Structure formats: C-alpha cells, structure tokens
Amino acid sequence: MAAGIEAEAFRQKLLAWYDAGRRDLPWRQSTDFYPVWISEVMLQQTRVEAAIPHYLRFLLRFPSLAALAMADEADVLAAWSGLGYYRRARNLHKAARQVAEAGIPRSHGEILALPGAGPYTAAAVASIALGLPHAAVDGNVIRVTSRLSADSEPSESPETRRRLAALADSLLDRARPGDFNQAMMELGATVCTPAGPQCVWCPVSGFCGGYAAGIQASLPVRHARPQSRRRELCLLLLRRKGDGGGDEVFLVRRDSGESRLAGFWEPLPYDAAWGAAPVAANFTHQIVNDRYSVSVREKWHGADSEPTVAGRWFPVADLPLVPLGGIARKAIDAVLAVRPTSLFDTGE
Ligand code: SF4
C-alpha cells in the first residue's frame, strides 16, 4: 500500500486506460535511445503540442546520434531555434559527442552523467528506452501525486518533493516502467489538469484522496509566484535588396561571452541615431520572469554602403537555417512573413 493506495490495482487501472487511448505522439513510435532522448530534452520546458513540429524537423535534420554528434554547433542551434532555453541544445550536442564515443548509456547513472540530463530526464529515458524501473517526476506527476495523496504542503519544498517522488516510485509498475511513467504524465496533461481536473473521467479516481476530500482543485499548493518584470525593447530590422534581387536583412551576433544566447543572431537595437524608421510590428514575449514589450522598426538600406556596426546580411530565404532566439524570430516573422504563414514553418 502506498499512501493508502493499493498499488497493483492502481497500476492496472492506469495502464488499461493508457493502453486504450494514449495519444499518438511522434516520439512514441520508437523506444530507441536517440529519439526518446531528443523528445525528453525538448519536453523539459516545452509543451507537447509546441514540441511536435520541432521534434519532427530536428530528426529530419539530424536523423541519428552520429549525425548530431558530427554537426556544427551553429547548425544544432539553428535547428533548435524557436524552442528557447538554448542551453538544452548545446548540452544535447555535447552529450551526442560523448555518446558517439562511449556508446549508448546502459544505466540511469550513465544517463544522469550526460550534459543537461537531470533526474527527470534520466528517469524518463532510462524507463522508456532501457526499461529500467525509475519513476520520472515532472510537474504533471507532482500534481497527480499531490492530489492522489491529498498532500496540502507547499509542493516546491524539497520535503514535499521527496514525499511525492517516493509515492510515484512506490506506484511505479516495475514490469512496464516506461509506459507507467508516460501514463502518469498523460493523466496529468489530459485529465488531471492544473485548472480543472476531470475527475468523473479519471481512471484512478477511486484511489484519489484529494477527490474523496473534495480538495483536488486546490492541489498542489504553491507559494505565490513573483510578478513578471516588465521590460521594453526596441529593435531595428534593416533590409535591402541583395545582388540577386532577393530581400536580405542585417543581423548582429550575440557576443560569445554572453552565456544564454551566445552565438545567436538578432536585429539591431534601435536608437535615434538610425534616424526615422516606422514601427512595423509590436508584440510581447515572456522569458522566465521577464515580460518584454517589443516594438520593431523597419528601414531600407541603400545597396551602395554598409552599416557602420559589425554584423552580416542574410538572404531571407536562408533565415530558417540561422540560429535565432525567440524574440528575433518573432520580430523577423512579424515584419516579413505574410500571415498566417511563418518564415520558420518549413512545412516538414
Ligand atoms: S480523481 Fe481527479 S484529482 Fe484525482 S487523480 Fe483523478 S483527475 Fe486528478
């Protein structure tokens, strides 16, 4: 019995539900290490729906671990563009090189030792790709286990996390750990959702302490979040006609000393020295706790001179292959793309 839950009956109910109606996600077509690992790294900070097109494009670009290991970092960052949290891509690339040399990891500990692999990723990959019995505890699983056990302590506290992870581990189906972990996450993503748990459709409602007590919607308990900081950003998209007649845009490269987006390209910061340039687009963009209000100005540059700042002209057609952060992509898309088409949606 785990927290009063009859574990074997719980597993049977949950896995029967998962087997009957699991979502058809592209990374579920294989349990090979490489696609499972790519998907789990992408899903660390990206929603399933948003990750799908990126996952498909990334695997088209780098269809094997060897292809990823041999790629240039700039190409990997370009393929990651739009997913954010670019440290994930750099670590993925480093890890691919390690694995290409040392071989596919054979244990949870070996996966955990790869660059960028935390306890969640290691447990998810170990269970799905290697069939090893490790409970993967992400935000979905924290929510589900806190509701199952009616745990009303703040879920951010290490003590609560340990308790909920121990519950997930005690419920884990040792014979089908990968399916069990995915079923728990699926339950959290589709039924036991943050705002409105749909308990009448829930396959494990008979085991749920939160539901029995009528407090499920208030769980997990969280500390109040800090308010987003508001930031203003004004960019300049400099354009010109290239030699071949196609449009080009001028971008500057982030200094390699700046860690988060080092090596990425972006439009110029706008200031009055650039003279009149009409606002072509406005949008907002959230990065962790910062909420950016971005305005993008546009200016055509003559073919007979070069800007006085260090940067490079890129043909618009090449932009999907250039490493761009989220704000840069949105800015370029907002000015150049004809809605609803995105420059960066290659339709693959
Ligand atoms: S009964 Fe409701 S609160 Fe409990 S696990 Fe199911 S959906 Fe979540």
Image (tube, rainbow, N blue to C red):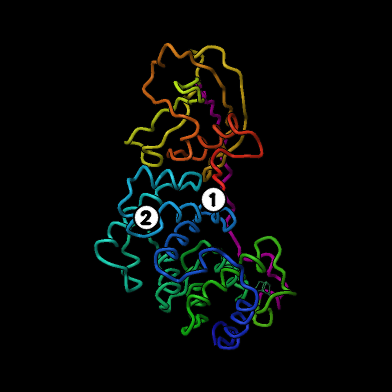
Tell me: is circle 2 under 8 Å from ligand 1.
no
In magenta, the rendered stretch is 210-239
Provide residue 97's location: percent of width, then percent of height. Answer: 29, 56
Q: Is residue 214 above or below residue 330?
A: below
Nearer the camera: disc 2 or disc 1: 1
Q: Nearer the viewer, residue 32 or 298?
A: 32
Q: CA distance from mark 2 to mark 1?
A: 22 Å
Provide residue 271's location: percent of width, then percent of height. Answer: 50, 18
Q: Tell whether position 233 is magenta.
A: yes
Q: Tell whether position 185 is magenta.
A: no
Q: Is residue 142 above or below residue 326?
A: below
Residue found 67% across the figure and 68% down from its top: 191
Q: Is residue 30 above or below residue 229?
A: below
Locate residue 103: give its quadrant: bottom left
Residue that badge 2 annotates: 92
Q: Residue furthest left?
A: 101
Tell me the amino acid under the disc marked 2. Answer: Leu
Q: Residue furthest right?
A: 200
> Which numbered disc, 2 or 1, marks the residue that appears first in the sequence?
2
Q: Nearer the viewer, residue 343 or 98?
A: 343
Q: Which numbered circle lies on residue 213?
A: none
Q: Which numbered circle lies on residue 348?
A: 1
Provide residue 223's location: percent of width, then percent of height. Answer: 57, 56
Tell me the amino acid under the disc marked 1. Answer: Glu
Residue found 52% across the figure and 61% down from its top: 156
Provide residue 193's location: percent of width, then percent of height. Answer: 65, 64
Locate residue 345: give its quadrant: top right
| Secondary structure under the numbered disc 1 in the rendered image | loop
Image quarter where the N terminus lies is: bottom right
Whether pointer 2 and pointer 1 mark residues with C-beta atoms closer than 8 Å, the reply is no
Left or right of residue 255: residue 24: right
| Secondary structure under the numbered disc 2 in the rendered image | helix
